[in-house]
Image (cartoon, rainbow, N blue to C red):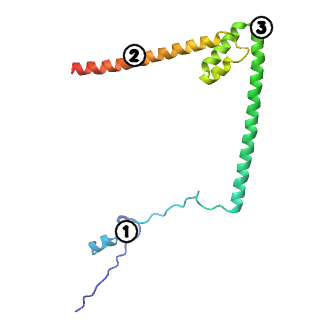
């Protein structure tokens, strides 16, 4: 005698069953657990990966060209500004050399102190730079470096002493 298979469909009401006021508990709880599935979330389409229309591609190309042209113009403007400043500083240094030679030494000293090592060597070759400024800068930088090393060693020494004193007191 063949056995008959029966399938039960359970219809779940939409929304919150507690708010409907009806008894929505299914008769066969085992079957409802097997058939229950979480709702599938819709996946968002990646807008960046979407293909662009030819008109959109042409518009993006125009925007890129305009941005590149503006960037080149801005760079040319900045380059001209740097050149004007360099020429003006040369004239200013010449004026100071005639009227206040100490100010020229101070100017070169401060510029060299701020410059990188490579730029400092290039500045040292500048013809209006007074004698002895480069050596003074190198000496001061060496002293600052040694002072920083002493401070680092002192702070490491204090940290080491604190740990050893904690170990002996425990």
Against 41, residue 107 (above or below) is above
Q: Secondary structure at mark 2?
A: helix
Q: Which residue is mark 3?
A: 98
Q: Which residue is mark 2?
A: 154
Q: Please name whichever residue, 14 or 133, is drawn nearer the observer in this view of the structure.
A: 133
Q: Quadrant of residue 3?
A: bottom left
Q: Does label 1 or label 2 sit earlier along the sequence?
A: 1
Residue at 73% x, 49% y is 65
**Label 1 to label 2, Cα distance in Å?**
67 Å
In the rendered image, residue 19, in percent from the top left (x then y), is placed at 37, 64
Q: Residue furthest bottom?
A: 1
Nearer the viewer's eye, disc 1 or disc 2? 2
Res 116 visible: no
Q: Does label 2 or label 3 sit earlier along the sequence?
A: 3
Q: Secondary structure at mark 3?
A: helix
Q: Quadrant of residue 166?
A: top left
Q: Secondary structure at mark 1?
A: loop
Q: Which mark is residue 37?
A: 1
Task: Mark 1: give few (<14), some (14-19) or many (20+) Cα within 10 Å.
Answer: few
């Amino acid at each position: 005698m063949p056995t008959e298979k029966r399938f039960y469909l359970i219809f779940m009401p939409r929304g919150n069953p507690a708010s409907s006021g009806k008894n929505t508990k299914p008769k066969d709880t085992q079957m409802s657990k097997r058939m229950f599935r979480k709702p599938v979330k819709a996946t968002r389409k990646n807008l960046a990966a979407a293909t662009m229309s030819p008109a959109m591609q042409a518009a993006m190309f125009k925007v890129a060209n305009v941005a590149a042209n503006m960037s080149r113009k801005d760079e040319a403007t900045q380059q001209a500004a740097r050149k004007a400043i360099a020429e003006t500083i040369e004239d200013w240094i010449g004026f100071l050399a005639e009227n206040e030679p100490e100010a020229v030494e101070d100017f070169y000293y401060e510029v060299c102190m701020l410059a990188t090592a490579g730029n400092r060597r290039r500045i040292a070759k500048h013809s209006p730079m007074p004698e002895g400024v480069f050596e003074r800068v190198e000496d001061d930088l060496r002293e600052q470096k040694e002072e920083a090393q002493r401070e680092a060693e002192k702070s490491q020494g204090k940290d080491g002493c604190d740990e050893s004193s904690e170990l002996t007191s425990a």
